[in-house]
Amino acid sequence: MDPAEIARLEALSSVHVEINGQAAALLVKLMADVKTEQPMAVLTRALGLLEQAVSAKAKGQRLGVYDPPTGRFVDLVV
């Protein structure tokens, strides 16, 4: 996403999103895992990671997790 698009989106007013119980439970768990009381801290990280995965896929690249001891690479599924 180019800087102008980012600035345009950041200028939008806030958006309220309703999530189901399963997603809410996962959000609370992840908030504890990253030691934050701010749901947006978790959501921003998650959306940023998803954006990188979608962008990589569009370019024919891969985004994943590499485990050096085993040499395994696991693609993130988008």
Image (cartoon, helix red, strand yellow):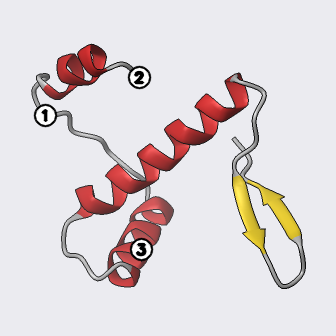
Are there few (<14), some (14-19), or many (20+) residues within 10 Å of tag 2?
few
Does dot 2 land on a helix, a strand or a loop? loop
Residue 72 image point, x, y percent: 88, 70
Q: Amino acid at mark 3?
A: Leu
Q: Amino acid at mark 2?
A: Met
Check if mark 3's residue and mark 1's residue have beta carbons within 8 Å.
no
Q: Quadrant of the N terminus?
A: top left
Q: Is residue 40 left or right of residue 31?
A: left
Residue tagged by mark 3? Answer: 30
Check if mark 1's residue and mark 2's residue have beta carbons within 8 Å.
no
Q: Is residue 8 left or right of residue 60?
A: left
**Residue drawn where x is 39% and y is 64% of the image:** 24
Q: Is residue 74 left or right of residue 51?
A: right
Residue 18 image point, x, y percent: 32, 45
Does dot 3 land on a helix, a strand or a loop? helix
Q: Quadrant of the C terminus?
A: top right
Labels 1, 2: front one:
2
**Residue drawn where x is 33% and y is 50% of the image:** 44
**Residue drawn where x is 45% and y is 53% of the image:** 46
Mark 1 and mark 2: span between their CA atoms? 20 Å
Residue 55 image point, x, y percent: 59, 29
Q: Which quarter of the figure has residue 53?
A: top right
In the image, residue 34 sits, relative to residue 76, either above or below, namely below
Q: Which mark is residue 14?
A: 1
Does dot 1 land on a helix, a strand or a loop? loop
Mark 3 and mark 2: span between their CA atoms? 26 Å
Residue tagged by mark 2? Answer: 1
Are there few (<14), some (14-19), or many (20+) residues within 10 Å of tag 3?
some
In the image, residue 24 sits, relative to residue 12, either above or below, namely below
